[in-house]
Amino acid sequence: MRFDNDALHAALHPRSVAVVGASDNPDKVGGRPVDYLKRFGYRGNIYPVNPKREIVQGVRCYPDLRALPEVPDLAIIAVAGEQVPAAVQDCASCGVRSVIVLSSGFGETGEAGRAQQEAMTALARKSGMRLIGPNAQGLANFSNGAVANFSTMFTQVPPQDGPVAIVSQSGATSAALYTRLREAGVGVRYVLATGNESDVTVSELALRVLDDREVRLLILYVEGIRDADVLAEAARQAGAQDVPVIAIKAGRGVQGLAAAASHTGALVNEDGVVDAFFNRHGIARAADLPAAVDMARLLLKPGVGPGRRLAIVSNSGSSCVMCADLAEEFGLPLAGLAADTRQRIAQSLSSYAACANPVDLTSSLLGNADVFGQVLRAVGDDPEVDLCVVSLPVAGAGYALDRMAEDALRVEAATGKALAVTATLESALEPFRQRGLATFATERQAVAAFDAATRLRAGMRRRPPRLEAIATLALPAGASAFLSEADSLAILSKCGVPVVEHEVCETADAAVQAWRRMNGPVVLKACSALLPHKSEHGLVHLGLDGEAEVRAAFEKCRGDVAGLGLPWDGAVVARMEKGRREFAVGAKLDPIFGPVVMISDGGKYIEALPDFVLLLPPFDAHEAREAMLGGLRVAPLFAGVRGELAMDIDALADLAAAVGRAMMAGARSIVSMDLNPVIVRSAGQGVVVVDALIERRMAPGAPAATVCRNESKTEELRC
């Protein structure tokens, strides 16, 4: 990553723009940027470049870049694919600071195109020039008219400068987001599409546009993230400026990942890890474009904060009931209205109307135009209300919709609380939309948008815990990719993880003595770094509680290891532990996002019925506990059912936080950790790790000992 503020500033605020491959036809790719620069008020110099023309769209045209009277800040390359490398070479030789390659046929097409793309990118980097694309739709800054873009939507839906910045890998998606926002009455300042991202990324441009303090909302579309550190910094800066960030991350499933690879040649990321990254950094993930736009309309309202107490006002009793169901589904508590509020509502409505929340206006709206504003103001004034959904399933002839919309606008302005208005008829919504109120076709859309927006606002206020400095964690020397179980448990113990009482025994006599010291049933397992997964080879013996049993298990393990052709490193004798439930805690070092920790329900059905949450360090025990309570399907069992005692989830959260710290401390030496099972006891009795496996980072090209392995139960974090 080379984040060059000056060059990217020049791309968004160019003093001059050259269009290489400029066309006199404004409907062609090489013609649209010239047309848009003229049409949308760009005040800098425009230099069409085309050796076959002297004038392009009324502007003097030049045969090549060297003929220009100055070196342009930005060059747009709109020539055929085979001519692009030479055009990039010319830009680099002339000292152009930033170049946009609109042409396609590179990394998204396969190996040959990828090789061309890499060579072109290397050339740009050597010269210090930033490259947007290739296969990019381009950049558009409507605050200064620098529209270096060929989207047709800017003529279909006229632009209006506003508070939103769109940064997208996909040009079509950037244009679709722009269109939906503009049709919703929202102004858009930036529409930036990065294409194949051979150099400049969405993350970099997101960070760049945040320098513009007029930006109040950032919407991203990504198919692959390769510079998580830059995106994290953009999220940090956005939070400091109170700018919400919404991200649409495509490629959730296998087919989506394959489509992303063919679309922009994107580096794809594990979906669950992406979710954890977004959650860590206060970025809201939208499922699709409509959800992102719905959320955006509410987040631009100053009244939407982390508060989630909802009031519902409708002229339909059934809508009141259905909205209440939706609020429960999305976890939005219904606000309890104060006695004074209910009295004010009662004075405005008929005696048979409902004055509690939800508020049923009944047919009062048809006979009394004052009712709507009076009730809405009473609800908005109530300190227990954070948000309000106004549902008007029946609103047409006979309803004073303009008056109602004016009243709603006054209430929103006076109370500082956001309203979401829903109606069956589009014509019924129009008066509210014209006045800048958030409108939705269905109650579900409105409630879902409130849910997502308030969660994002809460996430923006959450900050990573301040943890003590973590010393580097050193692993014992060895040629194997894995540590032995004993070494793995020893490392975890040093990191504050409670591990099972155990001893490493080289002889059967030593194993018997260990069993006697533990004074109860034990587990005996072969101990070898070359046997990371012992159970698959019959090298784990459970519930041994007699000298003969211990000796027999020891000798069998030694014989079986010899049969595998491996050296004998002894056996682990460990206390047989019991508890309330088995869990698993795993961790790995993601090449993009860094350490990732998984907390999962355990047992033999762990693969068949996956139930897990992912967290990115640093996190503390409180955050781990909240993640488990909110993300695990087995969470209702934590408090105990049918007379059971509660489980010690606090101890499991402490363990997960310790694993996160260990992964951060071992970032240079540890690839993964597998703690499975983790026995959770009743509340106050703690947890214990009874088996563990640590995988070390091997030096590139270093010879490794042959490992006898099968698939680990939690070898890969769920994605």
Image: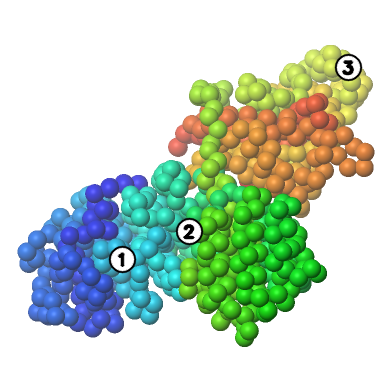
Around disc 1, counting alpha carbons within 10 Å, would you say few (fewer than 14), some (14 to 19), or many (20 or more)? many
The crowding category of the residue bearing disc 2, from other C-alpha atoms within 10 Å (few below 14, some 14 to 19, many at least 20), is some
At label 3, counting other C-alpha atoms closer than 10 Å, the crowd grade (few under 14, some 14-19, many 20 or more) is few
Colour scheme employed for the rendering of this structure = rainbow
Q: Separation of disc 1 and disc 2 at Cα?
A: 19 Å
Residue 544, given in percent of the width and then of the height, sits at 89, 26
Residue 300 disc label: 2
Q: Does residue 493 appear left or right of residue 58 in this picture?
A: right
First reached walking from the N terminus: tag 1 or tag 2: 1
Q: In the rendered image, which quarter is residue 312 located in?
A: bottom right
Q: Residue 142 carries which label?
A: 1
User: Residue at 62% of width from left, 80% of height from top?
Assistant: 399
Q: Nearer the viewer, mark 1 or mark 2?
A: 2
Q: Position of residue 584 (x, y in %)?
A: 72, 39
In the rendered structure, find residue 519 and report the number of the disc placed on it. 3
First in sequence: mark 3 vs mark 1 = 1
Q: Decide if residue 130 is on the left or right side of residue 162.
A: left
